[in-house]
Amino acid sequence: MQRIGILFSVVAVFLISSVQAQTRTGNADAPSRFPKVTIANSELRTIKSTSTGRDYDLYIHIPKQYDKDQTAKYPVLYVLDGQWEFGLVEQVVGGLVYDQYMPDVIIVGITYSGENADYVGLRAMDFTPTPIEELKGSGDGPKFLKFLKTELIPFVEASYRVDPRRRVLMGGSLGGLFTLYAMFSDPSLFSAYFADCPSVVWGDNYLSFKQEADYARVHKDLPVKLYVAVGGWDELSGPVQEFVHIVRSRNYEGLQLDARVIEGERHAGSVPEAFNRGLRFLFSEPVAQP
């Protein structure tokens, strides 16, 4: 009996080792055997822009109740850099909806078409409002803003049941720079703006500071919600905090501004907390207290 027990133990060890080996190698001989992971309640759309001449993929999150209530209309959250941000934003929104800190929304993650798209190079074109010599092709921000206004927003609002009074634009880094540029260029295009670690030092004259000053000379109001975040250890922390201080000092009529320094974080590490706090503020709804 003891020998049989030892035999069973040897066989068990062999089988476990075989399974572990197959797991480590990933069964490279049959890659099509395993299905790809997808994000539930989402779909992919593609749009070609005549404004920029580029093709864009749209990652779109559909609220769970969308098909159950055919009369409901939803806010839309437009997310720049969808190739990096869509999954995290979708998860943060899901948690905030569950906890009743915000309503469910349609999320539109904007990215570029093609398997080998040059995300870094293309975003440096679209998200920069002015060109600089060091970055070839930069400065297409006005074209990208036209794409949002005349092509993308009409496409989304013709395809889905949306509340056009509740559009939110969200971007980080250069995307945050573009978000501020869009706000001061045409504040009414979106009802709320989310700029995470915005590159406010872009350009020789610090474009964001100059654009805000130009806006302040002819406007007393800025009727939007604005959330700005930056990591405490981000090299942009000082300039971003200075920018927020200037905007606060204007006392713009109608502006609801919240800002947060994410202590102990740099440019990327601040993102999860920034998304959580920012979306709660921008989509704030009455919440039942525990």
Image (spheres, grey):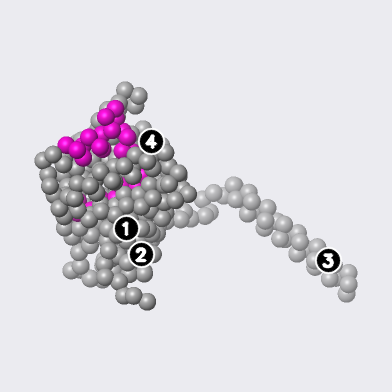
The mark nearer the N terminus, 1 or 2, is 2
> What range of the chain is rendered magenta?
189-214
Q: Amino acid at mark 2?
A: Leu
Secondary structure of the residue carrying numbered label 2: helix
Residue 279 position in % (x across, y down): 32, 58
Q: Residue at x 28, y 69 (%)?
A: 65
Number of marks in the rendered image: 4
Please give left or right for residue 265 compared with residue 238 in the image.
right
Residue found farthest to the front = 249
Q: Residue at x 23, y 71 (%)?
A: 69
Q: Nearer the viewer, residue 141 or 3?
A: 141
Secondary structure of the residue carrying numbered label 1: helix
The residue under label 3 is: 7
Alpha carbon distance from label 2 to label 3: 54 Å
The residue under label 4 is: 120
Residue 254 position in % (x across, y down): 16, 55
Q: Quadrant of the N terminus?
A: bottom right
Q: Residue at x 23, y 40 (%)?
A: 181
Residue 126 seen in this snapshot: no
- Name the mark nearer the viewer: 4 or 2: 2
The mark nearer the N terminus, 1 or 3, is 3
Q: Amino acid at mark 1?
A: Leu
Secondary structure of the residue carrying numbered label 4: helix
Secondary structure of the residue carrying numbered label 3: helix
Q: Amino acid at mark 3?
A: Leu
The mark nearer the N terminus, 4 or 3, is 3
Residue 281 position in % (x across, y down): 29, 59
